[in-house]
């Protein structure tokens, strides 16, 4: 790609997998006319396109693109459980002086009384009600519901179809799995993981994985002692 052809209003999407497809579609509707390019380190994706948007190189191109006037970025990696890569990419974009685009899919219902952090992403059919506060770089994925007065930390991923009843607090970097349900006023600690389909009725400590109905902490993975047997 000729770097000179990058327009001043280009948005750089970091990651070219499944989540990037959702990001591209939402950006094309919300920021019509803005040009997008994708960066992804996977060699087999080079010169491919996602919904017409080219994958032009890896993250080493960020400096060059920012240097010729690209101003915007979006994290295109979702992640299913581990939010750290997403956080790292967000910080990488900021460190190049780029501004994160906030995504509100046109079929998301977001209250005027909700607050969205920079780079937050709301996907189709999600519902964000009054008094909700969403942190930077958080995802509210398709069909997820955030009832009134929930507080969602930075880099959190609320996966497809999860339901958070009112006043739930989710700490930075936590992951709420597909279809999980969280009862009113529960606190989910930083970097905790709530498994898909779990029903959470008690607070979850930071760095804890809970699964099941009702959700309980997972037993620590057993050590592999076979070589000692
Ligand atoms: O450091 C990176 C990097 N690390 C991985 N920089 C950039 N620019 N890209 C990176 N990637 C790329 O992210 C990988 O090379 C890969 O192409 C992409 C991740 O794609 P994948 O489809 O595996 O995951 P995803 O996060 O896009 O989507 C998952 O999570 C979503 C929430 C999927 O499971 C989806 O089904 C799900 N909806």
Image (spheres, rainbow, N blue to C red):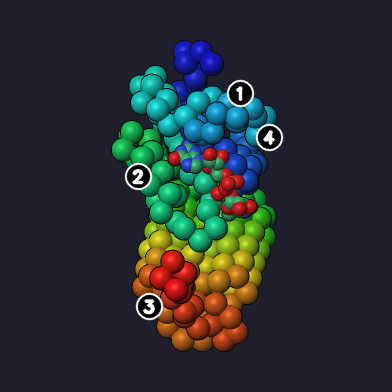
Where residue 40 appears, x then y in whole percent? 51, 34
Spatial CA span between label 1 and label 2: 25 Å
In this view, 200 is above or below 6: below
Q: Residue at x 47, y 53 (%)?
A: 120
Spatial CA span between label 3 and label 1: 44 Å
Q: Residue tagged by mark 4?
A: 51
Spatial CA span between label 3 and label 2: 25 Å
Ligand 1 is within 8 Å of the C-beta of the residue at disc 3: no
Name the N-terminal-most of marks 1 and 2: 1
Q: Residue tagged by mark 2?
A: 91
Q: Residue at x 40, y 27 (%)?
A: 60
**Numbered disc in front, either 1 or 2:** 1
Q: Residues within 10 Å of mark 2 (few under 14, many from 20)?
A: some
Spatial CA span between label 2 and label 4: 26 Å
> Would residue 177 be found to the left or right of residue 204 on screen?
right
Q: Quadrant of ligand 1?
A: top right
Name the N-terminal-most of marks 2 and 4: 4
Q: Residue tagged by mark 1?
A: 47
**Numbered disc in front, either 1 or 4:** 1
Q: Residues within 10 Å of mark 4 (few under 14, many from 20)?
A: few
Q: Are marks 3 and 1 in contact (CB under 8 Å)?
A: no
Quarter of the view holding residue 20 = top right
Spatial CA span between label 1 and label 4: 13 Å
In this view, 104 is above or below 160: above
The one of 20 and 30 positioned closer to us in this rendering: 20
Where residue 187 appears, x then y in whole percent? 41, 78
Dot 3 falls on a residue whose secondary structure is loop
Q: Residue at x 62, y 46 (%)?
A: 18
Q: Residue tagged by mark 3?
A: 205
């Amino acid at each position: 790609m000729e770097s000179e052809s990058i327009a001043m209003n280009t948005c750089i999407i970091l990651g070219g997998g499944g989540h990037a497809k959702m990001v591209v579609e939402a950006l094309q509707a919300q920021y019509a006319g803005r040009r997008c390019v994708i960066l992804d380190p996977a060699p087999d994706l080079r010169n491919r396109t996602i919904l017409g948007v080219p994958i032009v190189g890896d993250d080493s191109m960020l400096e060059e693109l920012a240097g010729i006037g690209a101003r915007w970025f979006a994290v295109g990696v979702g992640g299913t459980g581990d939010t750290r890569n997403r956080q790292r990419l967000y910080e990488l974009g900021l460190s190049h002086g780029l501004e994160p685009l906030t995504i509100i899919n046109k079929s998301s219902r977001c209250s005027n009384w909700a607050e969205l952090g920079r780079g937050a992403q709301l996907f189709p059919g999600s519902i964000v009600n009054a008094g909700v506060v969403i942190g930077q770089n958080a995802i509210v994925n398709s069909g997820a519901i955030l009832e009134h007065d929930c507080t969602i930390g930075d880099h959190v991923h609320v996966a497809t179809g999860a339901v958070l009843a009112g006043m739930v607090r989710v700490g930075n970097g936590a992951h709420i799995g597909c279809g999980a349900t969280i009862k009113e006023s529960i606190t989910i600690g930083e970097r905790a993981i709530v498994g898909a389909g779990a029903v959470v009725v008690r607070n979850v400590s930071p760095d804890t994985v809970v699964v099941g109905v009702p959700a309980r902490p997972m037993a620590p993975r057993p050590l592999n002692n076979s070589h000692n047997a």
